[in-house]
Image: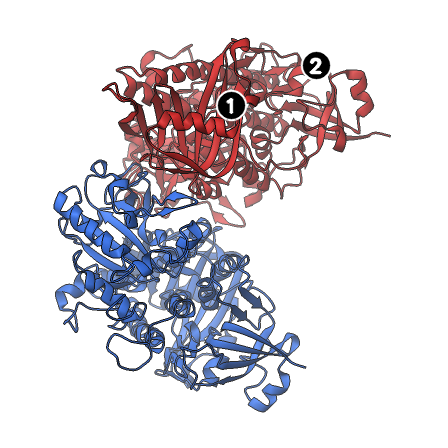
Chain colours: A blue, B red
Amino acid sequence: MVGTTTVDVLIIGAGPAGLALANWFRNSEIRVLLVDKKPGPTPRGQAEGLKSTTNEILDSFGIGQQIAAESWRLEEIAIWGPREDGRSGIVREQVIQDKVEELGTVRETMLQQSRVEHHMLQNLLFHSNISIRYSTCPVTVEIDASCSHQGNGYPVKTGLTREKQCDNNSNGSPTTNGVNGHNLVDEHIHAKYIVGCDGAHSWLRKQLGVVLEGDLTDSVFGVVDFVPKTNFPDIRRVCYVRSATGTILIVPRSNKEVRFYIPVGSGSNSALPDPKDWTLDRILAAARHIISPYTLEAGAVSWWSAYRVGQRVGSHFSRYHERAFLVGDAVHTHSPKAGQGMNTSIQDAYNLGWKLRLLLQWRLSTRSADGAAPAPEEALLRTYEGERRPVAQDLIAFDRGYLRLFAAPSAEFDSEMLRAMKFTTGLSIRYPKSCVVQLPRGVDDLGPSLLKADLVPGKRLQDFQVVYQADGIAVRIQKRMQATGAFRVIIFAGDIAGANQFARVQSLGKFLADRGSGLGRLTTPSEGDDSAAWKKVPVEVLVVHCADRASVELLAMHEVYRPWSSDQGYDYWRVFADAESVFEGHGRVYERLDLDRQKGCCAVIRPDGYVGAVVDVGDFQGLRGYFEGVGMLEVGGA
Amino acid sequence: MVGTTTVDVLIIGAGPAGLALANWFRNSEIRVLLVDKKPGPTPRGQAEGLKSTTNEILDSFGIGQQIAAESWRLEEIAIWGPREDGRSGIVREQVIQDKVEELGTVRETMLQQSRVEHHMLQNLLFHSNISIRYSTCPVTVEIDASCSHQGNGYPVKTGLTREKQCDNNSNGSPTTNGVNGHNLVDEHIHAKYIVGCDGAHSWLRKQLGVVLEGDLTDSVFGVVDFVPKTNFPDIRRVCYVRSATGTILIVPRSNKEVRFYIPVGSGSNSALPDPKDWTLDRILAAARHIISPYTLEAGAVSWWSAYRVGQRVGSHFSRYHERAFLVGDAVHTHSPKAGQGMNTSIQDAYNLGWKLRLLLQWRLSTRSADGAAPAPEEALLRTYEGERRPVAQDLIAFDRGYLRLFAAPSAEFDSEMLRAMKFTTGLSIRYPKSCVVQLPRGVDDLGPSLLKADLVPGKRLQDFQVVYQADGIAVRIQKRMQATGAFRVIIFAGDIAGANQFARVQSLGKFLADRGSGLGRLTTPSEGDDSAAWKKVPVEVLVVHCADRASVELLAMHEVYRPWSSDQGYDYWRVFADAESVFEGHGRVYERLDLDRQKGCCAVIRPDGYVGAVVDVGDFQGLRGYFEGVGMLEVGGA
């Protein structure tokens, strides 16, 4: 007798992507099952670098501080090249700061994958709606694509097998043959959605008939994590060392360790070296040769590997009318040099998670804004592929250019390097127009001037520092916006010390609180007014003003900006000033985002921190239109 | 049959003082036993505020980040007073920043005592030399004061009792009668030292015949931790609210809670209200009356109490030729208003701990610098009372003035308040001359100009930010100096881009490494050169230069500044630049400490972060003289 379990979301693979996805479902009633063929948490993983956007994501899961405490920061990059006098050896060409001004914070930190996974896993432990089973893998899957997203059906039927039948050494499940698979099934899972976070050799990808596309130029890398004993002077900086015999990338880690990346060959299949031929000694000898005449001996070696990477992107990121999804390495692969593997996996998952959460806990309106098909649920979920596939494609194009940049630096090296650093932070990503990225009415595409602006639909809200009106404590806005599934309406209220602007912001407050034609149904609880009821509200209203902080009295502002709960009194932490903090300086948000200090503006921020829409403070219908477009409010209101 | 256990240090009481003391013995072979009559860790404690020095101490135990993550920061103080127009009610008089410029960091944070204890306790768990027994208390103690510190004797014999015989409700042990006490003994502990961290009703204090001295003016306070529901606008600031009917202190905490301190009476014994008469409702009513016309209702109340405090200091802090010590509340009591109880307890323990550790793991020379008695061990341990008793006395004088300040603010309120804030940070503490606080030869006391300087023997080394020469990462110096028991010689090397100054610093390096007449026996391992051997060295050499960082090559400096270990290569983290960091700005150490950028200077920093001596970079014998004075080197050398 084979049992059946019913869940909302079945996640295949508990690596960085699967764990990040599961973290979206904390503090909800959505039932989630993660399965992984591994016998337990990863003791060790290849990935290591965390980019700023990823750190913001981990912060939004509430685990940023623990991770920062363990991470090693990277702040300087040294570029070494061959001596120009024709003699053998290398010279330091320049040292640049590993910094992107727009970020205003650390761009990159190092922490090994297993620790990142550890914190994401720990973060799930006290959420009984989320379960994890190790030594478990899927062997069959059937999807009823005709099932409507509006209904309460569970169209994804997956057969799981346990324990010994999950062969860790195979690159997938014991069999991909449906008939044999059925014989192995220990349990059936009925789910609304299935997500493959099962890595480069993804079993689900094969079941879905998704193929990886790309050229056949693969690379073989040697990677070593070790305590170096060397007189190379820049060993505690990120180093690109280009010598006559090759290029290595050196990245400092904690505990006196460094990581060396040593490319040992690339080309088409037949010309490639076999990773199995590369021993630790051979890899270290190659590194030693490149940094000669400096010495290099290895103290403790904590991990090493030689492996092969290609550059490919999946033909689809979702299938079966958005019932099945592929995330991370399961759907794109690239070289490790730009440190984008774990980051992109987590960011893919972060993009998908809130969309699933939204429609599993909020019934979308059947009357979509333009009355056309597809159903709003499908439109919402399609944006996952629409947003993330171009990122994967860009990443591969970037990866090639990045490798070229270091092979042969040009006169524009500095600006190219800065562009590369910006790219890997994700600052240059802009998601296309969709139901969750809305342009002003009548505008189909943004002109070049708007594209360069810093508060633009489809771009990530740049993290910035503000201070709480109530207590003067500094906070970074992305950290303030925890991953609860809520949208935020941020009112950049301008100088509300002026009576006119204050009146405009108060009128907007009235509209935001209005449960009829305004946004009240989204911003205030439908039942009760205790703090628990407030936590279920799908839109949180925040205010960032630039008036003299001493001239503003929080309690004089409209109640929607400092709502009352019957058990905890006022919420004092929704209104911020763009002001000098006591200890952390001035965030200068209005300057950095180029905002009008008199008129201000109003931004809808999606649950994942991306800008959904930007409207004038007085454009009430523009604001309402956004949520009608997503399907969260009926078109026309009330 | 009653068993016997032998330890080096027996600590009575596992509260903030006892746990802080025990933390000094991590990573050593010193055997420590803590006993506490409580059945387990404190679920809740009265103390709450952490001052900057305490946070530095917790950082030096390696638990600063966890504690900071849980703490609530305090940044603004609002002063409210009665309306001046004669009508009833209160008005906001001013808002001041809770900041002391010299600190350069947060002055004060809030975290409840039980969480502070939790982190200190967790930090002991994997150190098998440190044990804790709850439900255990001492009932007898005998000390053989004739025993020499030079020998290997265990002159402190303590009888412990367990379980039910420890009555939690009594203010001490079941009996202080020696005969009855002996009947209850379950186990004898033979120890070299005993330390009473057993609180205001200290059992050990009574055994030692130490009396608390002070006047008989006590106060009764009501304290409530709760979620306020109020329209008082400054509820998220520290507030001193002075009305016609009384004064309250409001301190914000995490989780939307605040703490109210409400004095409900003071005076001599007979005039004092009985704390038992003060119910929660009565205390809240008193508070409500003071902040009227603002409303005040209580949401969840997590803790409240009414209690009585006097201002007293023990006649002695140590007895029996420095075999027995009293720490924290056991030896001084004062009002909770300045938030100094837990802080002073931890700081007392921090002062004592390194001294015990030093002489338990380093045989002091019998030839003291001036050839006179007492033995160097006794001289070292006497500095505990010599340093901490005046602090307790100052604290009580401060406490009285502080209460007056708020009762009737003067025209100098701002400067008085700043002075008060500096006092509570400990910035104004200066320990007197002793074997561990040495003035230049021939100088018996410092003139007023030197006393005002920022790098002075007896004062705490002001925390400052520098960047590592090797990787550019910013670090705060107090955090860099972990509580390992090591002294630090910090060479403020000046501008070593100049050849002359570089040569002076190299010569000093040679002296520091010289195992004969120099400091080599203290700065370099006596056996082996692996990283474990380096960890046992009692003096760590650090360099802070102010040259252009790019002009300095770390590996060109003397090896004592970047020593080699056979398993881990060079130590890259001993040389710092006073330079701009990539992300955290410029520490401006030379400016802040008013150091000569050409000549620099050389400071001995004690294991507890206080300055022991300051000498010229060329004054080799001045440097050696310090360690001869402590007894760590034979006078005259080699």
| Label 1 chain ID | B
Q: Which is more toward the observer, A612 or B563? A: A612
Secondary element type, mark 1: helix
Amino acid under label 1? Phe
**Residue B249 x, y percent position in the rendering:** 40, 26
Secondary element type, mark 2: loop
Q: Nearer the viewer, mark 1 or mark 2?
A: 2
Quadrant containing the C terminus of chain A is bottom left
Q: Which is more toward the observer, A15 or B134? A: B134
- Would residue B457 appear left or right of B144 to someone viewing this image? left
Tell me if residue A292 can be seen. no
Residue drawn at x 74%, y 26% is: B190
Q: Residue furthest right?
A: B1
Circle 2 residue: B145
**Location of residue B93 by image quarter:** top left
Residue drawn at x 31%, y 46% is: A562
